[in-house]
């Protein structure tokens, strides 16, 4: 099985993700042990299996 590291701005924010889904303006990820985490105002920017990374980017800009 391939678990992914979730990354925002080159910072690790979640490990061992096996599921990711965009729901409205957020991304929901689930870990290998069933733990859930939601990232509001983010979208999936890149899935890189070779590097085992799921990269998120903000959906809104902050002034």
Image: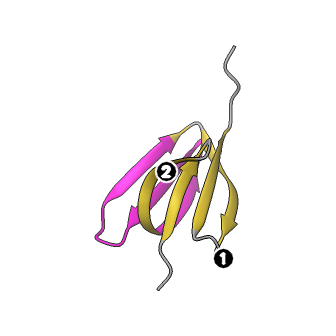
Which is more N-terminal, label 2 or label 1?
A: 2
In this rendering, the answer to whether 19 lies above or below 29 is below
Rendered residue at 28%/70% (across/down): 33
Mark 2: give few (<14), some (14-19) or many (20+) Cα within 10 Å.
few
Q: Which residue is disc 1 drawn over?
A: 50
Name the element at disc 1: loop
Quadrant, the C terminus: top right
Taking the view exactly as shown, the residue that stands out farthest to the bottom is: 1
Q: Measuring from the top left, give residue 17's x and y in whole percent.
A: 45, 66
Residue that label 2 marks: 12
Picture colour scheme: secondary structure
Q: Is 20 placed left or right of 43 in the picture?
A: left
Expressed as whole percent of the image width and height from the top left, the position of residue 9 reads: 62, 41
Q: Badge 1: how crowded within 10 Å, few (<14), some, or many (20+)?
A: few
- Residue 14 lies in the magenta-colored region: no
| Percent coordinates x, y for residue 41 in the rendering | 58, 36
Q: What is the magenta range?
A: 18-39
The answer to whether residue 29 is magenta is: yes
Q: Quadrant of residue 51?
A: bottom right
Q: Nearer the viewer, residue 15 or 23?
A: 15
Locate residue 45 relative to residue 34 in the image: left or right: right
| Mark identifier at residue 20 | none
Q: How many marks?
A: 2
Nearer the observer, 36 or 5: 5
Q: Residue at x 44, y 47 (%)?
A: 38
The image quarter containing residue 58 is top right
């Amino acid at each position: 099985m391939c678990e992914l590291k979730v990354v925002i701005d080159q910072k690790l924010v979640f490990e061992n993700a096996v599921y990711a889904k965009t729901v409205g303006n957020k991304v929901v990820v689930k870990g290998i042990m069933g733990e859930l985490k939601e990232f509001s105002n983010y979208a999936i920017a890149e899935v890189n299996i070779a590097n085992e990374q799921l990269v998120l980017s903000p959906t809104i800009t902050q002034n």
